[in-house]
Image (tube, rainbow, N blue to C red):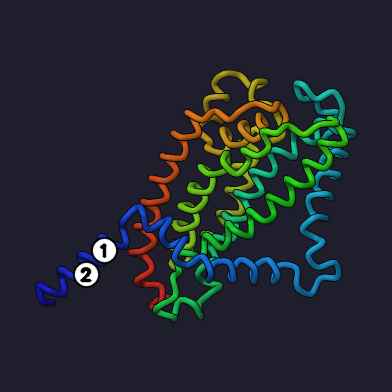
Amino acid sequence: MSRAKILVNGSESREHARPGRILTDLWNHRSLLAQLIQRDIAGRYRGSIFGGVWAFLNPLLMLSLYTMVFGVFLQAKWGGATNSAQFSLVLFAGLIVFNFFSECINRAPGLITSNTNLVKKVAFPLQILPWMCMGTAFFHAVISLMVWVFFAALIYHQVHWTVVFFPLVLVPLVFMVLGTCWLISSLGVYIRDIGQFIGVLTSFIMFMSPIFYPIDTLPEPFRSVLNINPLTFIIQEVRAILIDGALPDFARLAVHTLASFVFAWLAFVWFQRAREGFADVL
């Protein structure tokens, strides 16, 4: 290989590894990404009788189910929740966060392998596929939030204005999920069994997150373990702005965002190098 070619390849590698590429790719391919998200959402409900109405029915059914199981059958209690309906809203606020996370992570192993036609297209930016996945998950999260706000207005007779901070609180989660999707989707090309493992892992993470129980009720050693889980902070912040009407912890939010962005960047560098062998394996 000539010295000139080495220099060119080195420049390309540095260009691909720039942290700013994470956001510039999102901006440069925004039109393509919007089409992919729209197609992904439409494909999710194509052929069903109720079509896109399921986007509203699913969170409604989920909210009803958890109200019945935890509020009526198990008589579960939560500090500040005086009845089963209020308990369900506390529970559902945490599930909005987890469902966003799990929808993306569970799809990640097959994100590349299910789009082999795109892998063969040299010009197609494969790195935006996790953004597509998150766009669909964010659409469902917004629908779930709308359902939550509707029932909060009925039950609490008010909706705190701090709900506007919901997208901001999700920013660290977005970068964390983005990086995780880049890692898992690239590994899924070479290790097909990873999809089976991810399903078990997300179930484990669900019960290791303060969704069904308040973290304050746990002994101190267990609280420390749960605080390692990055979902814990996001779930608590979402509940704070939705239920308590409190402002987000901007300082901790900034730290989590920075850490998540660094993780996403490292995962992006890995993905860009791993993608070179996708066409050979697929």
CA gap between label 2 and label 1 equals 6 Å
Determine whether, in the image, residue 196 is placed left or right of residue 121.
Answer: right
Q: Position of residue 126 (x, y in %)?
A: 45, 69
- On screen, residue 207 above or below 246: below
Location of mark 2 (residue)? 9
Q: Nearer the viewer, residue 61 or 144?
A: 144
Say which residue appears at 36% left-offset and 65% top-offset: 274
Query: In the image, which disc is placed on residue 35?
Result: none
Instruction: Using the rendered view, name the quadrant where residue 151 is placed.
Output: top right
- On screen, residue 72 above or below 138: above
Location of mark 1 (residue)? 13
Question: Quadrant where the N terminus lies?
Answer: bottom left
Q: Position of residue 62 (x, y in %)?
A: 80, 47
Say which residue appears at 43% left-offset and 67% top-offset: 190
Say which residue appears at 41% left-offset and 73% top-offset: 278
Q: Nearer the viewer, residue 229 or 133?
A: 133
Determine whether, in the image, residue 198 is placed left or right of residue 280.
Answer: right
Q: Position of residue 227 (x, y in %)?
A: 53, 29
Q: Nearer the viewer, residue 256 or 73?
A: 256
Determine whether, in the image, residue 172 is placed left or right of residue 6.
Answer: right
* Badge 2 vs badge 1, beta-carbon distance below 8 Å: yes
**Type of amino acid under label 1:** Ser
Q: Residue furthest front?
A: 161
Q: Residues within 10 Å of mark 1 (few under 14, many from 20)?
A: some
SS at mark 1 in the image:
helix
Instruction: Using the rendered view, name the quadrant where residue 69 is placed.
Output: top right
Question: Quadrant where the C terminus lies?
Answer: bottom left
SS at mark 2 in the image:
helix
